[in-house]
Image (tube, grey):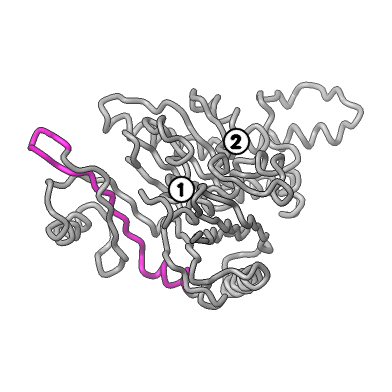
């Protein structure tokens, strides 16, 4: 019997859902849903609006709420890959709490703790060891997340971590080349960095930076409303090459060309903040791996759709940068899911797809 999961990606700008069927022939896409949230500051009202929109989504698409998998992200989520001496499952269950006290910067009574043994029977200087990934999420973050879902009438089957959902998608779509690769999920308010080493996450880091900060920079510099700044950002994006603002405008529409140049300059300046944080993460990886360097970067998330962002990051990082199409592993009805749309906007749904895969394919 085919199994149906719904991956629910709750962001600050939109709610995205991927309904996935797992049958004998592989994975089939049943529904792909994106609902934009009204722009406002974080408050109780926004949580209520988010819950209402999720409930509407569940009702409209007749989703089985017992098959919903959601995810959390942000600074309340800590993920660490560690070494532990080779031991059995029972001993690991006990020892992992001691390891968590050393590697997770929150007291154990503040977090929900989970772990996964990635590899066993590895050999090091001190004998056999195993590679383990530790996940700690603040209980308060889980409580707030579940409060929104409960208000929507949803009791999620699993609450996962968005960055691990991102890895789930990548390992399925790239079964061979999973070494020295950096995954970047650039969302509205948050950027997740996942660095893969020997096929598994080595470093997972969330940065409080996203497309929202680009829009705010355009809003401030051009003195326009948030809504107008958002439209200008989406329309102009980043030019492949930096433009000299002092160069005379040679265009029939002088105002349009000036706005384009200004937006390009503002976005480039704001993007430097993210580029520096990415470089710091890469430098940390290199320092821990005896000079080993990242080979390539894979983009996903809503901000990955910004015009020429891949070219800009490639220029800044000196690496190959490409945008993921997570649906290369999925089949679907062409009449419902236009190939052109999936090709251009598919990276928006990477986390949602990874969540939907959670019980189908685990790390």
Q: Residue at x 74, y 54 (%)?
A: 227
The x and y percentages for residue 298 are 50, 35
Q: Which residues are drawn in magenta? A: 122-146
**Nearer to us in this view, 124 or 334:** 334
264 w.r.t. 211: above or below: above
Q: Is residue 252 left or right of residue 179?
A: right
Report whether residue 248 is seen: yes
Indicate whether residue 88 is drawn in magenta. no
**Nearer to us in this view, 245 or 338:** 338
- The reply to whether the C-beta atoms of the residues labelled 2 and 1 are less than 8 Å apart is no
Report whether residue 233 is seen: no
Q: Is residue 320 left or right of residue 269?
A: left
Residue at disc 2, secondary structure = helix
Q: Residue at x 60, y 57 (%)?
A: 16
Residue at disc 1, secondary structure = strand
The x and y percentages for residue 52 are 63, 74
Q: Is residue 345 left or right of residue 274?
A: right
Q: How many numbered badges does the structure rendering display?
A: 2
44 w.r.t. 5: above or below: below
The x and y percentages for residue 149 are 52, 72
The x and y percentages for residue 132 are 24, 48
> Looking at this rendering, what residue extends furthest in the right direction?
252
Magenta stretch mostly in which secondary structure? Answer: strand
- Res. 207 mark: 1
Name the residue that disc number 2 marks: 269
Which comes sooner in the sequence, label 2 or label 1? 1
216 w.r.t. 314: above or below: below
Q: Residue at x 36, y 64 (%)?
A: 138
The crowd level at tag 1 (other Cα within 10 Å; few <14, some 14-19, many 20+) is some
Indicate whether residue 137 is drawn in magenta. yes
Q: Quadrant of residue 75?
A: bottom left
- Res. 352 mark: none
């Amino acid at each position: 019997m085919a199994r149906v999961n719904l991956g629910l990606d709750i962001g600050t700008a939109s709610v995205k859902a991927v309904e996935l069927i797992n049958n004998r022939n592989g994975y089939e896409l049943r529904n792909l849903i994106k609902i934009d949230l009204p722009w406002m500051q974080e408050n109780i009202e926004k949580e209520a609006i988010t819950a209402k929109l999720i409930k509407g989504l569940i009702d409209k698409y007749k989703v089985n709420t017992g098959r919903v998998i959601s995810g959390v992200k942000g600074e309340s989520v800590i993920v660490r890959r560690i070494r532990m001496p080779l031991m059995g499952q029972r001993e690991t269950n006990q020892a992992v709490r001691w390891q968590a006290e050393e590697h997770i910067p929150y007291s154990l009574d503040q977090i929900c703790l989970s772990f996964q043994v990635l590899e066993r029977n590895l050999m090091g200087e001190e004998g056999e060891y195993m590679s383990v990934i530790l996940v700690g999420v603040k209980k308060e973050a889980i409580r707030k997340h579940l409060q929104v879902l409960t208000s929507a009438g949803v009791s999620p089957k699993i609450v996962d971590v968005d960055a691990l959902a991102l890895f789930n998608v990548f390992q399925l779509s790239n079964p061979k080349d999973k070494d020295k690769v950096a995954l970047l999920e650039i969302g509205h308010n948050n950027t997740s960095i996942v660095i893969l080493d020997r096929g598994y996450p080595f470093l997972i880091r969330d940065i409080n930076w996203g497309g929202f900060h680009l829009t705010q920079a355009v809003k401030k510099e051009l003195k326009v409303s948030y809504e107008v700044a958002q439209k200008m950002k989406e329309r102009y994006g980043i030019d492949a090459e930096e433009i000299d603002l002092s160069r005379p405008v040679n265009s029939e529409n002088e105002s349009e060309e000036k706005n384009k140049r200004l937006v390009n300059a503002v976005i480039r300046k704001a993007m430097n903040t993210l580029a520096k944080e990415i470089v710091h993460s890469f430098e940390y990886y290199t320092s821990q791996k005896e000079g080993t360097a990242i080979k390539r970067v894979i983009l996903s998330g809503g901000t990955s759709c910004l015009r020429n962002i891949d070219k800009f990051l490639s220029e800044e990082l000196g690496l190959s940068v490409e945008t993921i199409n997570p649906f290369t592993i999925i089949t679907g009805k062409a009449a419902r899911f236009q190939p052109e749309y999936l090709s251009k906007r598919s990276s928006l749904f990477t986390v949602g797809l990874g969540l939907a895969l959670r019980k189908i394919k685990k790390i």
